[in-house]
Amino acid sequence: MGLEGRVALVTGATGGGMGRSIALTLARDGADVVLNYRARQERAAAVVAAVESLGRRALPFAADVSDADAVDAMFAAARARFGRVDIVVNSAGGPWKPQDITEIAPAHLRAVLAEEIEATVLLLRAALPEMRRQGWGRFISIGGYLADDWRFGPPEAPLDYPLGKAARHWLTRTLGPRELAHGVTVNAIAPGPTPPVSLDDALAALRGGRRGRAGNTPQDVAEVAAFLCSDEAVRITGAVIPLPGATAV
């Protein structure tokens, strides 16, 4: 969709889920990519090779995106390598751990909300000034399907995880209209269950392989992200786009 010359930074970009497929899809569409990850350098190296096989440049960067200094260092490295950051996809998030509210350990709660909320604010803080100056930017968060109201959600669902996703939705709806005057869009994708896939399967889906009808795949989420990054989506902002994860037969 015409992302040649753009630079994308994707958090949580080297595991088996949505972040990796988003990074590969943006590379397919022409963007160079900063691949954020927490650990497992060998997985990051494999995704770097996949991006380079698509003819784009990749920069792997290990960082905890809930740490302000780590986020600033990552953006500094991205700008040193590529000159700027045009697109940020806020994909990394907290763990899914269903518990009764009386059982949630304070340290676990803080860790989940730091990954979901604090990291989002830190990424916005690092990205928006440059996007505003250049008059073009895309910020996309991965939220959660029906996270705004999980009273009717699955009874085994955790409580802290959707709380963090709902906060991402709120930030999206609040900041999106404010940033449009600067040429910057802020949107979120709210997927339902999206099982991880192997790198080989991710690349096959990227090349147009059949993704099925029974639920979300990481590539389904990635295609929505790619559209939101495109110039065709220039007036879409403040949107939380649901992907329920199931299609009627």
Image (cartoon, rainbow, N blue to C red):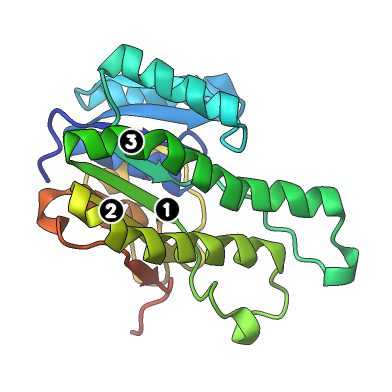
Give the residue type that dot 2 points to: Glu
Label 3: which secondary element: helix
In this rendering, position of residue 240 left or right of residue 169: left
Q: Quadrant of residue 204?
A: top left
Residue sitting at 41 percent across and 16 percent down?
Answer: 77
Q: Residue 179 — which label? A: 2
In this rendering, position of residue 240 left or right of residue 67: left
Give the residue type that dot 3 points to: Pro
Q: Position of residue 213 (x, y in %)?
A: 34, 71
Q: Is residue 57 above or below residue 177?
A: above
Mark 1 and mark 3: span between their CA atoms? 18 Å
Which residue bears the numbered disc 3? 129
Q: Position of residue 178 (x, y in %)?
A: 30, 58
Q: Nearer the viewer, residue 82 or 182?
A: 182
The local crowd at label 2, few if under 14, some if 14 to 19, many if 20 or more residues have their Cα within 10 Å, is: some
Mark 2 and mark 1: span between their CA atoms? 15 Å
Q: Residue 141 — which label? A: 1
Residue sitting at 35 percent across and 57 percent down?
Answer: 221
Q: Is residue 27 above or below residue 156?
A: above
Mark 1 vs mark 3: in front: 3
The local crowd at label 3, few if under 14, some if 14 to 19, many if 20 or more residues have their Cα within 10 Å, is: few
Label 2: which secondary element: helix
Query: Which numbered disc flags the more N-terminal residue, 1 or 3?
Result: 3
Could one spot residue 23 in this view of the protein? no
